[in-house]
Amino acid sequence: MSYAASGADHVEVRSSRLWALLTGRFTRLLFPASLVADHVGISTTLVEFWLTPWRRTDEHLPLSHIAEVAHMRGLIWDRISIESSGGLNPLVVAGLPKRPAQFFVDRVRERLHVTANTR
């Protein structure tokens, strides 16, 4: 199931399992990648290999360190890349459904705009 969930200060988007099935990414079929944004920053969770789900990469980027939110649109699925002000290792999640990806990007950009105006 791929979705974009929204709470008072929590927005989440997950990669599509159908995308994972059609592209042959078995690990993403069992463990979809996710991006979560809250009032503190953006986090991503990626399971590296399906046989070892305890080996996962959890990354967090504070809102104050976000330089760019890139939304790459595909024909059916989209990709979101969050780049830090340091420029190293952007948070990237592919295979996102179009509407949830756009919703996520819009909410993150709103938060960045609010954060920039309060400094």
Image (tube, rainbow, N blue to C red):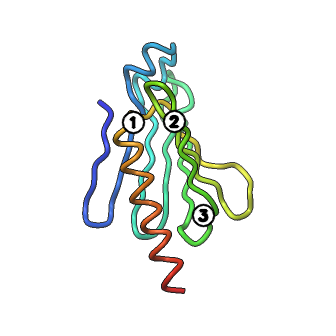
Point 74% across, 57% down: residue: 87
Residue to which mark 3 is pinned: 66
> Marks 1 and 2: in contact by CB < 8 Å?
yes
Point 46% across, 36% down: residue: 33
Residue to which mark 1 is pinned: 98
Where's residue 5, x and y in %? 28, 49
Point 31% across, 45% down: residue: 4
Give residue 9's mark: none
Name the kind of residue labelled 1 in the image.
Lys
Label 1 Cα crowd, 10 Å radius (few <14 / some 14-19 / many 20+): some
* 49 relative position to 3: left or right: right
Residue to which mark 2 is pinned: 73
* 38 relative position to 49: left or right: left
- Towards the viewer: 10 or 76: 76
Badge 1 marks a residue whose secondary structure is: helix
Label 2 Cα crowd, 10 Å radius (few <14 / some 14-19 / many 20+): some
Badge 2 marks a residue whose secondary structure is: loop
- Point out the frontmost of discs 2 and 3: 2
Point 55% across, 67% down: residue: 62
**Precedes in sequence: disc 2 or disc 3:** 3
CA gap, disc 1 and disc 3? 22 Å
Where's residue 84, x and y in %? 66, 60
Name the kind of residue labelled 3 in the image.
Ile
Instruction: From this view, report whether residue 21 is shown above or below residue 65.
Output: above
Which quadrant does the N terminus fall into? top left
